[in-house]
């Protein structure tokens, strides 16, 4: 058997929790990251691409990185949330190690299409930023849902309050029209939203422990970045302050990929509200009962939605992976 059965393209806006997700994927023995496509979101797309190149170089790996969507499809571009991820997206690192790495010249959408056509049915797309790259890739190749093995995205929320408005989650709110197109397509799609990411609070002490035990530029950089991010979440949420930590958000999409048994699912159609005060809200249709699996998810735009999570097991799996042998 292929020792790394999950070939993944990571679509991302790094972003501190994006960095955490990338390092989990690089560290995990069954995940092979075959490309990183970047988008605006936590930072500009230019900075997102710089960060993806930097994080991979720090970890000693060479993976194609592309630059993608610079702005939402329809709404005005949002201001990057420097108070959450730092102006540089990595918690305002005081300095960066010199690294040499260059971008793949293709657009992110074209890269996704090229890779999916070259390996039909073999690639999982893990999207942890606004969904413009995926929407543009769909426009280039309408058969994309059948060419990709599956799509797992961090975004949206069903019952949990939003994090950028009362009802909307940031990745969806940042480009609701792109998200609406993505949810309407016939992928095998799993949404990993705030219903579960707000249940998994990662203590900063865990990242210190990892950086102490596994001494490397990659782990010390991650620890520094998370310390900025944990300050933001700890000021905002008293229950997060109690353990001085942060939400794991993006890494949960990868945890679902490798350990889906840690999650409880609902099934249904997701609609995205694109206008008005509820813009960015993801609404799960009630046509399906929680836990009931429809016969063919690809045929009718039905998504799976993570609604429950075993938080302790997720934390342990993250720490175990980052403490494994993945850094040179
Ligand atoms: C999502 O928004 C971004 O700020 C995070 O990186 C994550 O992808 C959480 O709502
Ligand atoms: Ca993200």
Image (cartoon, rainbow, N blue to C red):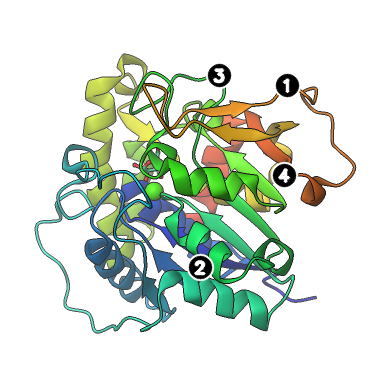
Specify few, some or many for label 2: CA neighbours under 10 Å numbering under 14, 14-19, or 20 or more. few
Q: How far apart are marks 3 and 4 (CA)?
A: 20 Å
Q: Given contact means CB atoms under 8 Å apart, are the residues at marks 4 and 1 in contact?
A: no
Q: Does the residue labelled 2 lie within 8 Å of ligand 2?
A: no
- Residue 244: image x %, image y %? 30, 28
**Nearer to us: label 1 or label 2:** 1
Dot 2: element: loop
Write down the quadrant of residue 174 in the picture: top left
Mark sitting on residue 159? 3
Q: Is mark 1 within 8 Å of ligand 1?
A: no
Dot 1: element: loop
Tell which of 41 and 28 is nearer to you. Answer: 41
Specify few, some or many for label 3: CA neighbours under 10 Å numbering under 14, 14-19, or 20 or more. some
Q: Distance between the residues labelled 4 and 1?
A: 14 Å
Give the residue pinned by disc 4. Answer: 301
Give the residue pinned by disc 2. Answer: 325
Give the residue pinned by disc 1. Answer: 286
- Residue 84: image x %, image y %? 23, 38
Q: Given contact means CB atoms under 8 Å apart, are the residues at marks 1 and 2 in contact?
A: no
Tell which of 143 and 234 is nearer to you. Answer: 143
Residue sitting at 31 percent across and 46 percent down?
Answer: 208
> Sequence-wise, which precedes: disc 4 or disc 1?
1
Above or below residue 197? Residue 287 is: above
Specify few, some or many for label 4: CA neighbours under 10 Å numbering under 14, 14-19, or 20 or more. some
**Nearer to us: label 2 or label 4:** 4
The C terminus - image quarter: bottom left
The N terminus - image quarter: bottom right
The residue lying furthest to the right in this view is 295
């Amino acid at each position: 058997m292929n020792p790394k059965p999950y070939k993944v393209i990571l679509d991302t806006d790094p972003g501190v929790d994006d960095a955490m997700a990338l390092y989990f994927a690089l560290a995990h023995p069954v995940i092979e990251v075959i490309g990183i496509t970047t988008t605006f979101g936590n930072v500009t797309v230019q900075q997102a691409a710089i960060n993806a190149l930097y994080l991979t170089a720090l970890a000693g790996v060479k993976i194609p990185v592309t630059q993608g969507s610079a702005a939402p499809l329809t709404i005005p571009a949002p201001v990057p949330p420097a108070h959450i991820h730092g102006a540089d997206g990595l918690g305002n690192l005081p300095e960066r190690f010199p690294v040499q790495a260059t971008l793949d010249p293709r657009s992110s959408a074209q890269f996704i299409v090229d890779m999916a056509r070259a390996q039909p049915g073999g690639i999982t797309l893990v999207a942890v930023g606004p969904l413009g790259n995926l929407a543009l890739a769909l426009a280039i190749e309408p058969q994309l849902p059948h060419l990709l093995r599956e799509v797992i995205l961090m975004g949206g929320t069903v019952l949990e309050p939003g994090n950028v408005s009362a009802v909307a989650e940031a990745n969806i709110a940042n480009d609701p029209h792109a998200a609406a197109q993505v949810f309407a397509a016939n992928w095998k799609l799993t949404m990993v939203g705030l219903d579960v990411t707000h249940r998994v609070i990662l203590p900063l002490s865990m990242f210190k422990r990892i950086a102490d035990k596994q001494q490397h530029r990659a782990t010390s950089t991650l620890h520094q970045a998370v310390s900025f991010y944990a300050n933001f979440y700890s000021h905002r949420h008293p229950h997060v302050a109690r353990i001085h930590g942060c939400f794991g958000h993006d890494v949960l999409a990868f945890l679902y990929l490798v350990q889906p048994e840690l999650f409880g699912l609902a099934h249904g159609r997701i609609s995205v509200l694109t206008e008005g005060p509820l813009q960015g809200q993801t609404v799960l249709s009630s046509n399906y009962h929680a836990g009931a699996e429809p016969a063919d998810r690809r045929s009718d735009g039905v998504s799976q939605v993570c609604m429950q999570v075993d938080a302790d097991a997720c934390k342990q799996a993250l720490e175990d992976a980052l403490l494994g042998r993945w850094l040179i």
